[in-house]
Amino acid sequence: MSLFYSHLPIYWLLVSQLLSLFTLFFYWWDKRQAIKGNRRVKEATLHGLAMLGGWPGALIGREVFRHKTQKRPFYLILYSVSALHCAFTALFVYVALA
């Protein structure tokens, strides 16, 4: 059992990076669709991906692609999700080291 827990942060980091790349792709795709005037990705989908762990990719995508920068409710939710993930990660590390 301790072997599983000793590697848990590595797996978590790998999954987090993959989710971030996946989320970044969705931000790029949505921006591309917006420029073309085509059907867009729902905001709930973008928020859901961030909540699942893709928040770093969401933050990067928002800045790099200048995506949804004028929609205050959107970025307030995104920043809140990001802050919660950081808090839970800090709590996890604190408990793991205690």
Image (cartoon, rainbow, N blue to C red):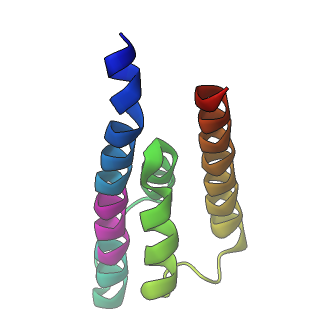
Q: Position of residue 74 (x, y in %)?
A: 63, 65
Report whether 4 appears left or right of 43: left
Is residue 48 placed above or below 7 in the rendered structure? below
Closest to the observer, 7 or 73: 7
Query: Image quadrant of residue 17?
Result: bottom left
> Is residue 10 among what the camera can see?
yes
Q: Position of residue 69 (x, y in %)?
A: 60, 82
Residue name at image x 28 percent, y 78 percent: 38
Query: Image quadrant of residue 37?
Result: bottom left
Is residue 83 placed above or below 65 in the rendered structure? above
How many callouts does the rendering have?
Answer: 0
Residue name at image x 47 percent, y 75 percent: 60
Which quarter of the rendered picture does the N terminus lie within? top left
Residue name at image x 70 percent, y 55 percent: 80
Q: Position of residue 11 (x, y in %)?
A: 32, 38
Q: Is residue 25 magenta?
A: yes
Residue name at image x 59 percent, y 42 percent: 89
Q: Overall secondary structure of the magenta stretch?
A: helix
Is residue 56 placed above or below 96 in the rendered structure? below
> Is residue 39 among what the camera can see?
no
Query: Image quadrant of residue 79?
Result: bottom right
Which residue is most to the top? 1
Report whether 48 appears left or right of 1: right
Is residue 2 placed above or below 85 in the rendered structure? above
In magenta, the rendered stretch is: 20-28
